[in-house]
Image: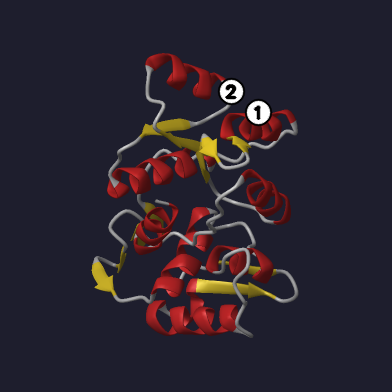
Amino acid sequence: MREAVEAGLALAGFTVDAVDNLHDAKAAATDWSYDAIVLDLALPDGFGLELLQEWRKAGSSTPVLLLTARNATFDRITGLDSGADDYLGKPFDLDELAARLRAIVRRGQGRATPVLEWADLSLDPANRVVTKAGESLTLSRREFTVLETLMEHPQKLSSRAQLEERLYGWQEEVESNAVEVHIHNLRAKLGRGCIETVRGEGYRMGRA
């Protein structure tokens, strides 16, 4: 199931790290910053709810979606009252899981609308569509991810390291100059002024 969820979410445009026990989950969440976490309750070395409670006591506000076969009303209430942001029972549909993840990520960012807009650009994360002045554009998966990251907070600088976190998984090798290459390609497709570079600090959306 872990492999199926990982593959399904990757197809939906997420960069996914998948682990199968509490020990590795703790390590990943300590070493990496995530937009959201899908947490199963029944794990080989413990109960996922205890890990969720541990994260919340430590002050973590990362959105968490519980994924479990325990789908009684009492179990859902317990999970939500323990700090979960959403709850999905097994069996489940991967498209619904992806939609619920987009929703809790959006809420976590303080956004009400599902479509991102900036100047004449529009980006729809659910349908993986980008338009400029009403015309559809073709972007690679990682170009889409870079643009989505920048458009989520268009006036805020995103550092190279922050963009790399969105492009690559916890144990995935980061390609040299990958961010710069994707920025270059986006400027070629969107207009040179669409993304501003602040030397030594990062990137943000421009107005062209």
Residue named by callout 2: 82
Q: Quadrant of residue 86?
A: top left
Residue drawn at point x = 24 percent, y = 70 percent: 135
Q: Residue at x 32, y 53 (%)?
A: 126
How busy is the neighbourhood of tag 2: few (under 14 within 10 Å), some, or many (20 plus)? some
Between discs 1 and 2, the one toward the N terminus: 1
Q: In the image, residue 201 lies at what x, y percent?
A: 73, 69
Question: Left or right: 33 with respect to 75?
Answer: right
Q: Amino acid at mark 2?
A: Ser
Q: Is residue 74 above or below residue 24?
A: above
Above or below residue 97? Residue 130 is below
Q: Is residue 107 visible?
A: yes
Distance from label 1 to label 2 (Cα)?
A: 6 Å
Residue 116, position as x, y percentages in the image: 40, 53
Residue extending farthest top: 74
Residue 202 percent across, percent down from the top left: 67, 69
- Pick the residue in front: 9 or 139: 9
As helix, strand or loop, the secondary structure at mark 1 comes to helix
Residue displayed at 39% across by 53% down = 5
Q: Amino acid at mark 1?
A: Gln
On residue 53, which mark appears?
A: 1
Number of marks in the image?
2
